Image: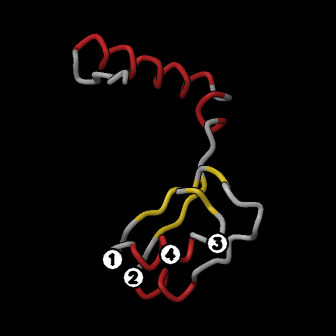
């Protein structure tokens, strides 16, 4: 999930029609786009930032409701270790 030179390894390890979500860049080195394994396996690559939720009031409200409801129901049980 963290871009950089390891993106090629992620694409090689991905299964057919997998999705790779990139949400950061751990390395300052470029992240070469692994075209061949992506085309060969039909892999989808998508960038993600938290701003996609936090900057949109409706999305943020929906996310907060989801978290609150699932904590209250016990469906989400955070492990503090």
State the CA–CA distance, disc 1 to disc 3. 21 Å
Which of disc 4 and disc 1 is earlier in sequence? Answer: 4
Q: Are marks 1 and 3 in contact (CB under 8 Å)?
A: no
User: Residue 68 is drawn in which quadrant?
Assistant: top left
Which of disc 3 and disc 1 is earlier in sequence? Answer: 3
- Find residue 79 and name its label: none
Q: Position of residue 31 (x, y in %)?
A: 68, 70
Provide the residue designation for mark 1: 16
**Residue drawn 22% across and 14% down?**
73
Q: Nearer the viewer, residue 59 or 47?
A: 47
Q: Is residue 30 above or below residue 38?
A: above
Instruction: Tell which residue pokes out farthest to the top in this image.
Output: 72
Relative to 10, 23 lies left or right? right
Crowdedness of circle 1 by 10 Å Cα count: few (<14), some, many (20+)? some
**Residue drawn 55% across and 77% down?**
8
State the CA–CA distance, disc 1 to disc 4. 15 Å
Q: Position of residue 39 (x, y in %)?
A: 48, 85
State the CA–CA distance, disc 2 to disc 1. 5 Å
State the CA–CA distance, disc 4 to disc 3. 8 Å
Provide the residue designation for mark 4: 9
State the CA–CA distance, disc 2 to disc 4. 14 Å
Provide the residue designation for mark 3: 5
- Find residue 41 and name its label: 2
Which of disc 3 and disc 2 is earlier in sequence? Answer: 3
Which of disc 1 and disc 2 is earlier in sequence? Answer: 1
Mark 1 or 3, closer to the camera: 3
Question: Which element is circle 3 on?
Answer: loop
Q: Is residue 50 above or below residue 81?
A: below
Question: Which element is circle 1 on?
Answer: loop
């Amino acid at each position: 999930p963290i871009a950089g030179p390891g993106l090629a390894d992620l694409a090689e390890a991905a299964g057919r029609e997998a999705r790779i979500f990139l949400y950061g860049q751990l390395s300052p080195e470029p992240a070469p786009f692994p075209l061949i394994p992506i085309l060969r396996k039909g892999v989808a690559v998508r960038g993600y930032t938290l701003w996609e939720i936090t900057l949109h009031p409706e999305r943020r409200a929906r996310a907060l409701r989801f978290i609150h409801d699932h904590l209250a129901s016990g469906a989400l049980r955070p492990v503090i270790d």
